Image (spheres, rainbow, N blue to C red):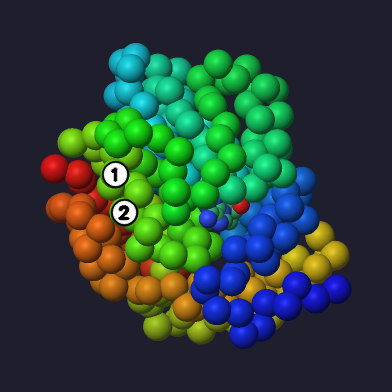
Amino acid sequence: TSFGFRNVDNGEKQPLVDAVFHRVAERYDLMNDLMSGGLHRVWKNAMVAALNPPKRPGWAALDVAGGTGDVAFRIVEASDSNAAVTVLDINGSMLGVGRERARKRGLEGRIDFVEANAEELPFPDESFDAYTIAFGIRNVPRIDRALEEANRVLKVGGRFMCLEFSEVEMPFLDKAYETWSFKAIPPIGKAVTGEAEPYAYLVESIRKFPDQKNFADMIRRAGFERVTWRNYSGGIAALHSGWKL
Ligand code: SAM
């Protein structure tokens, strides 16, 4: 089967992205471990450690493109179950897997699951203390709109944090990573989910995503201040942070 990813322009890619995640939802968590060699766990732990959610009731976080709940579970745990976390994703299949995982962990009461688009968040202005998005913004067709929405729904003093694949800034790692991405990831995807092309798309979407500095500029343009980033694993992933002040 072909998803027809080649030559799609940004505005048209959402249905194709949705088809990929509907197809892989049940095996998404396994794929993440295989493709990153488990590193995505280390990066997500570091993200939530940097966010450092307070251990007091009333603090609310929105995890956009939250998929199967990985970041949300970590936030709830880091807050000693005080944080109220909303997982938002455009894909009902991914949310279904997340809901089931939350039930198994006894976290249903702390996490809401909302099916919606990052470009049009169904929340009033100034609703959340933190906005997180991990490996999600790259899939959103109009990134500038998603960033403006992030800014709108955050309270003044709220924190924006984005974890995303970025530009590798170590010369040798660079080559190894490229080989891994193009030679290994699509076949692993095919072996586990039966499809190689969606994974070829994912690798390509990483290459097209702006580098650390350019993405920081986009975050600033959406109205955030004190924008910084830190690299993980030599820049394979980067964590961007900003504040609504
Ligand atoms: N945050 C999770 C994690 O790190 O494991 C999931 C990341 S997964 C690579 C990307 C997610 O982005 C998918 O669940 C997909 O459905 C979601 N997504 C894609 N486009 C979206 C949009 N426009 N609005 C909200 N979510 C979107």
Q: Are marks 2 and 1 in contact (CB under 8 Å)?
A: yes
What's the amino acid at mark 2?
Glu
Q: Residues within 10 Å of mark 1 (few under 14, many from 20)?
A: many
Residue at horizontal 16%, vertical 52%?
225
Instruction: Tell me the number on the disc at residue 152.
Output: 1
Q: Give the image location of residue 84, x and y in percent.
A: 43, 23
What's the amino acid at mark 1?
Arg
Secondary structure category for the residue under label 1:
helix
Residue at horizontal 80%, vertical 76%?
2
Secondary structure category for the residue under label 2:
helix
Q: Nearer the viewer, residue 38 or 137?
A: 137
Residue at horizontal 64%, vertical 47%?
91
Residue at horizontal 40%, vertical 17%?
82
**Marks 2/1: CA–CA distance:** 6 Å
Relative to 55, is 225 on the left or the right?
A: left
Name above or below for residue 189 compared with residue 148.
Answer: below
Q: Give the image location of residue 237, x and y in percent.
A: 43, 62
* Image quarter (top left, top right, bottom left or bottom right) of the C terminus: top left
Residue 112 occupies which quadrant of the picture? top right
Q: Is residue 213 visible?
A: yes
